Image: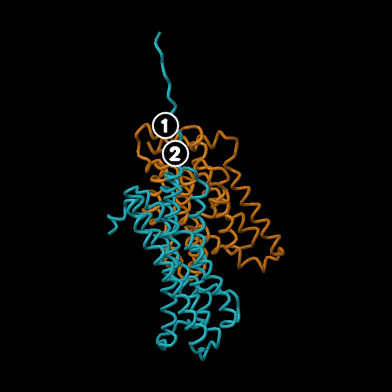
Chain colours: A orange, B cyan
């Protein structure tokens, strides 16, 4: 069932005419704007580059959050899903996986390009990509949670940012610190372990909460 | 006790007596506490007169955290037993909690200027209180944006509980981040061993704030119960159709 849901989401995205790429465009625009705002000097920007990439990923993901359940809620797919008596938990899991594949993975793959324009050392690029990969599950799951809470509401865009921010802050803190940690102790950096822990907590807490929220939406 | 009060009618009877008690106790404690704090207590050696800010700042920060704990417990009760009174309670705890959090930030900032020479420091405590304010605002926004009361209560309670689990994580990560960036540049003002002439006004001010919180939330619950009663009274009866057979 989960596989079918993921396949459906991926097929829908492929046939949507590239709307799933908008997050990537936003990522590029954010990087360009921050370079302009910081004056464009590579020496000045190099220390901030991992933080800027992290911010670009987080904002791009947050802007994609409302779409996770929006169309399914509006066209009645979710109600049909509930009628079929399948577990909402596995639906949330499937949504998190397809969100990570469609909206976060392209950003992580684009990180080396962003690193190129900031002239980052290779080690920092590796560290940024690894920390983003480890934080991706938590990012996707909290996105699913807040999208489930706000499904079917008008003007959820700003609100979803407000609601998800408290959950994202620990990820941002450890994700950016992991770049220093990686420079000192490579993959054994404590920050990377904390990121894994945060992702596991999000699976344990965020997924059941998201399915409970969906259930409340469909009551 | 809680079982007894779970009935809205009995609760209204109880709150009719309890609300004024809380209100007057709060007022009395404020008058006494402020007199002790602002006039009688001596200025501190290190902070001078600015120490008087502590008497309004510390209780506000304390109440802000207490309010969120109460909010999370009420949300848990509302989520498990779907009790409408718990919804009203959770909703009524949120607004005073937000106000106390905001007050703690503002007074902290005003105190920070004379004590540390800056309005704002990104230190662990201030940052986590700021994030607590965001959590409160998100919670209130859920109530605002969802018109159906039951659904709003359920979604808001989910958010409040997940937020409650997240608070220690946020605290831990902010402390970690802060120690990396600025190791112990500020000695904490809450050093152990307060003399009694400072401790007493502080204790009374904490009592005053707690009673104020109790009064505000009891008033809020009362108003919410009445509001939902009016909403119920205003619903029109289902349309009736008379079918006549010829």
Q: Is mark 1 on a helix, strand or loop?
A: helix
**Tag in front: 1 or 2:** 1
Chain assignment, label 1: A
Q: Quadrant of the C terminus of chain B?
A: top left
Distance between the alpha carbons at the discs numbered 1 and 2: 17 Å
User: Which residue is denoted by mark 2 in the rendering?
Assistant: A6
Q: Which mark is residue A49?
A: none
Q: Where is residue B34 in the image (x, y as percent from the top left)?
A: 49, 79
**Chain of the residue displaying label 2:** A
Residue at 54% x, 64% y: name it. Answer: A123
Provide the residue designation for mark 1. Answer: A80
* Position of the N terminus of chain B by quadrant: bottom left
Q: Residue furthest bottom?
A: B45
Q: Residues within 10 Å of mark 1 (few under 14, many from 20)?
A: few
Residue A109 visible in this rendered orientation of the protein: no
Q: Which of B238 and A8 is in front in this view?
A: B238
Q: Do labels 1 and 2 share a chain?
A: yes
Q: Residues within 10 Å of mark 2 (few under 14, many from 20)?
A: many
* B155 w.r.t. A199: above or below: above
Name the element at disc 2: helix
Counting from the top left corner in percent of width and height, residue B217 is at: 43, 60
The residue positioned 39% from the left and 11% from the top of the image is B245
Marks 1,2: beta carbons within 8 A:
no
Q: Which of marks 1 and 2 is nearer the N terminus?
A: 2
- Residue at the limit of the structure toward the top, as seen here: B246
Residue B75 at x, y = what percent?
Answer: 38, 54
Which of A208/B75 is in front?
B75
């Amino acid at each position: 069932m989960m596989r079918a849901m993921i396949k459906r989401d991926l097929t829908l995205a492929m046939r949507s005419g590239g709307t799933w790429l908008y997050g990537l465009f936003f990522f590029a625009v954010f990087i360009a704007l921050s370079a302009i705002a910081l004056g464009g000097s590579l020496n000045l920007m190099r220390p901030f580059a991992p933080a800027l990439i992290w911010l670009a990923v987080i904002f791009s993901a947050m802007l994609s959050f409302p779409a996770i359940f929006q169309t399914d809620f509006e066209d009645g797919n979710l109600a049909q899903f509930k009628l079929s008596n399948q577990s909402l938990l596995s639906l949330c899991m499937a949504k998190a996986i397809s969100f990570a594949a469609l909206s976060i993975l392209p950003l992580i793959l684009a990180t080396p390009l962003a690193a190129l324009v900031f002239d980052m050392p290779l080690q920092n690029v590796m560290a940024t990509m690894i920390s983003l990969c480890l934080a991706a599950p938590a990012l996707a799951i909290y996105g699913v949670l807040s999208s489930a809470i706000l499904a079917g509401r008008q003007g959820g865009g700003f609100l979803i940012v407000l609601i998800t921010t408290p959950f994202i802050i620990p990820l941002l803190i450890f994700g950016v610190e992991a770049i220093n940690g990686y420079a000192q102790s490579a993959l054994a950096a404590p920050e990377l372990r904390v990121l894994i822990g945060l992702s596991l907590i999000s699976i344990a807490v965020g997924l059941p909460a998201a399915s409970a929220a969906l259930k409340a939406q469909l009551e | 006790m809680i079982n007894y009060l779970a009935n809205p009618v009995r609760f209204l009877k109880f709150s009719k007596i309890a609300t004024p008690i809380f209100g007057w106790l709060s007022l009395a404690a404020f008058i006494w506490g402020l007199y002790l704090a602002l006039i009688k207590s001596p200025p501190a050696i290190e902070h001078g007169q600015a120490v008087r800010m502590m008497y309004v700042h510390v209780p506000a920060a304390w109440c802000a955290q207490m309010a969120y704990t109460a909010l999370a417990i009420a949300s848990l009760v509302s989520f498990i037993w779907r009790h409408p009174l718990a919804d009203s309670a959770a909703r009524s705890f949120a607004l005073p909690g937000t106000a106390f959090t905001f007050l703690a930030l503002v007074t902290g900032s005003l105190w920070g200027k004379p004590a540390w020479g800056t309005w704002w420091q990104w230190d662990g405590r201030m940052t986590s209180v700021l994030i607590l304010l965001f959590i409160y605002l998100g919670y209130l926004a859920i109530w605002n944006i969802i018109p159906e009361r039951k659904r709003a209560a359920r979604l808001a309670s989910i958010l409040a509980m997940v937020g409650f689990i997240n608070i220690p994580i946020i605290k831990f990560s902010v402390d970690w981040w802060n120690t990396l960036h600025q190791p112990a540049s500020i000695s904490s003002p809450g050093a152990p061993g307060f003399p009694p002439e400072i401790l007493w006004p502080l204790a009374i001010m904490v009592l005053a704030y707690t009673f104020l919180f109790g009064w505000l939330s009891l008033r809020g619950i009362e108003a919410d119960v009445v509001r939902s009663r009016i909403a119920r009274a205003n619903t029109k009866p289902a349309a009736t159709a008379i079918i006549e057979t010829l």
